Image (tube, rainbow, N blue to C red):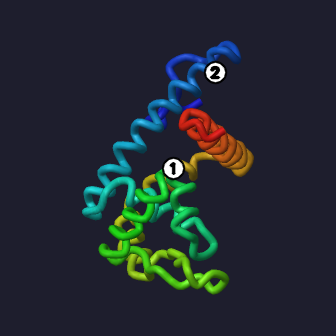
C-alpha cells in the first residue's frame, strides 16, 4: 500500500477500523492540500479562488448554465453568483448568451480563451496528477472514481444541511 508520497506505508493495516481512520485522515490531508493548490493556481492566474472553482465547474457542464445554476453549483447566494459572473466576464473567462427559452435571462458559458488560459496553467499540474493515477490498475481507478463521486455527493448534501437548505 502506498502513502500520500507514493512510498509504501510504514506498517500494514491490521483491521478495517484502522483502514477507515487512515482514509479519513488522508482525505483531510488531501482536502487541505487541494485548497492550497487551488489558491496557488488562482493566484497564478490572477483570479479569486472562488472564480477558479466556478470556471472549473463550468468546464464540466455540457452547455451554458444560468446564474442561478452557478449559485447552486458554488453554494453562493444569487446576488453573489451574479457578482462572480460579472468578475469572470470582465476577466474574459465567461460570456453571457441570451437564453433561447427565456429572453429575460442570460446563460453563462466559458469563453474560448478561458479554456486556453486555464489549460496552459493546468499543463504541468495535470501531468503530475496523471502520474499519480498511472500507478493504479483499472479496477483500482474504478474504485477511486466511485469513492470520489460518492464523497462529492455526501459533501454537497452536508453543505446544504449545514446551510439549512435541507
- Distance, label 1 to label 2, CA atoms, is 32 Å
Nearer to us of marks 1 and 2 is 1
Q: Residues within 10 Å of mark 2 (few under 14, many from 20)?
A: few
| Depicted 42 relative to depicted 111: above or below | above
Q: What SS does tag 2 mark? A: helix
Q: x, y percentage for residue 5?
A: 44, 35
Q: x, y percentage for residue 14?
A: 66, 13
Q: Please name the residue shown 44% across and 75% down the image.
A: 115
Using the rendered image of the protein, determine whether residue 69 is visible from the camera's viewpoint: yes
- N-term mark: 1 or 2: 2
Q: Which quadrant: the N terminus?
A: top right
Disc 1: which residue: 75
Q: What SS does tag 1 mark? A: loop
27 or 59: nearer the viewer: 59
Q: Please name the residue shown 51% across and 67% down the image.
A: 67
Q: x, y percentage for residue 144?
A: 65, 43
24 or 144: nearer the viewer: 24
Disc 2: which residue: 19
66 or 4: nearer the viewer: 66
The quarter holding residue 23 reads: top right
Amino acid at each position: 500500500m502506498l502513502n500520500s508520497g507514493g512510498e509504501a506505508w510504514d506498517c500494514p493495516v491490521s483491521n478495517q477500523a484502522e483502514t477507515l481512520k487512515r482514509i479519513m485522515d488522508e482525505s483531510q490531508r488531501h482536502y487541505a492540500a487541494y485548497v492550497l493548490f487551488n489558491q496557488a493556481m488562482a493566484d497564478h492566474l490572477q483570479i479569486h479562488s472562488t472564480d477558479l472553482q466556478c470556471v472549473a465547474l463550468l468546464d464540466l457542464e455540457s452547455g451554458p448554465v444560468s446564474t442561478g445554476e452557478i449559485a447552486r453549483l458554488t453554494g453562493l447566494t444569487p446576488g453573489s453568483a451574479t457578482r462572480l459572473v460579472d468578475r469572470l466576464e470582465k476577466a474574459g473567462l465567461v460570456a453571457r448568451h441570451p437564453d433561447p427559452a427565456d429572453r429575460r435571462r442570460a446563460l453563462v458559458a466559458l469563453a474560448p480563451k478561458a479554456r486556453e488560459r486555464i489549460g496552459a496553467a493546468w499543463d504541468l499540474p495535470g501531468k503530475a496528477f496523471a502520474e499519480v493515477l498511472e500507478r493504479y490498475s483499472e479496477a483500482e481507478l474504478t474504485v477511486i472514481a466511485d469513492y470520489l463521486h460518492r464523497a462529492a455527493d455526501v459533501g454537497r448534501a452536508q453543505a446544504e444541511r449545514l446551510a439549512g437548505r435541507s
